[in-house]
Amino acid sequence: MSARLKSILQYVIILGVTILLIYFSLRGLKVAEGENKWDYLVRTWQSAHKGWLLIMAVIAMVSHLFRAERWRMLLVPMGFNARLSHSLLSLMVGYLVNLVIPRGGEISRSYNLYKLDKIPVVESFGTVVTERIVDLLCLVILVAVSFAFESQKLIAFIETLPISVSGSSKSKGLIALAILLLLMLLAFVLIKRNRKLNQFILKTWNSFKEGILSIFQLKNKGLFIFYSVIIWFLYFAMTFAVLKAFPAKNSLDFTAVLRLFAIGAIAMAAPLPGGTGSYHVLVPQGLFFLYQIPLSDAVAFTFIFHGWQTLLFILFGALSVVITSYIVKRKSRKHEK
């Protein structure tokens, strides 16, 4: 099987899982007899306070700006000085690609930055991995804080999820692990025997490692931590703003929004395009189980919340692609002169 066919098959499987999860989520949307589910979603959208949705969009862009600056900081210790505008454009292109290819945005934003500022992709990608590690740490802290506020409810909610592993699943997992280890051993032997390949991989790894370790060479680590805290605070503020846009969710207090945000962040971390599917299953169940919000309202809210975020990613991402193309062409014309 060719690499291209494998890639297509992978996307088909991911798309299938996503559609299945969305279908599963829509089944919980109970509407009045004779009413169309789509009409119900449209009516929910119309009932939303558009001012709060616009506030959420502004908060989202501010969070992206901070993230772009934090990424730029990681590139400085390696001797690369990316423009903040170019870092932001590359970040938005990455978000757009993530909607189609899970985690594909991490590589595409590094490549986009290379086109704009000629920063090597491998080193740049290493800093992206560092960013993701920091974000994972922030997510773990967030979940820990959420559990500290009310662990009983969250544990009870987790127990309602269909995540139990059967004996056959465990055995299949062990077989897959054994095959993976065998392939890794075979790859190691082939690399050792091929000198040119060995040198290429070693050089690539050293560049990648330099990007990952750039966080330890930062001149102002406190500012980096501050940016990370601000980014996640703004993510929380986005959730709060959208909840305020829907009258039925206005009664939720700070701790409720925090728990819901933690559930949503975990769902978005799933390896699906933009968290689509997993988000539509976990968040409505959380609203229904933890706060007794009718499941139909919870599902409608989730579709609109995630849909609004996705629309922003598409609009700003597409605009960033156009601007990037214009900048690259303009630079190319200058070099030709």
Image (spheres, rainbow, N blue to C red):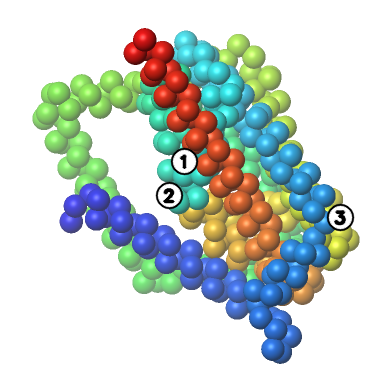
What type is the residue that disc 3 sits on? Asp
State if disc 3 and disc 1 touch (CB < 8 Å). no
Picture layout, residue 7 above or below residue 118: below
What type is the residue that disc 2 sits on? Ile
**Residue at image point 41% right, 13% down:** 334
Is label 3 in a helix, a strand or a loop?
loop
Q: Which residue is mark 3?
A: 253
> In the picture, residue 87 is in which quadrant?
top right
State if disc 2 and disc 1 touch (CB < 8 Å). yes
**Residue at image point 11% right, 30% down:** 193
Q: Which mark is residue 101?
A: 2
Report the quarter where the N terminus lies: bottom left
Q: CA distance from mark 1 to mark 2?
A: 7 Å
Image spot of residue 335 (x, y percent)? 37, 12
**Residue 304 visible in the displayed image:** yes
Image spot of residue 217 (x, y percent)? 53, 14
Disc 2 residue crowd, few under 14, some 14–19, many 20+, Cα 10 Å: some
Q: Is residue 315 left or right of residue 259?
A: left
Image spot of residue 208 (x, y percent)? 38, 25
Disc 1 residue crowd, few under 14, some 14–19, many 20+, Cα 10 Å: many
Q: Is residue 137 left or right of residue 120?
A: right
Is label 2 in a helix, a strand or a loop?
loop
**Residue 126 visible in the displayed image:** no
Q: Which residue is mark 1?
A: 105
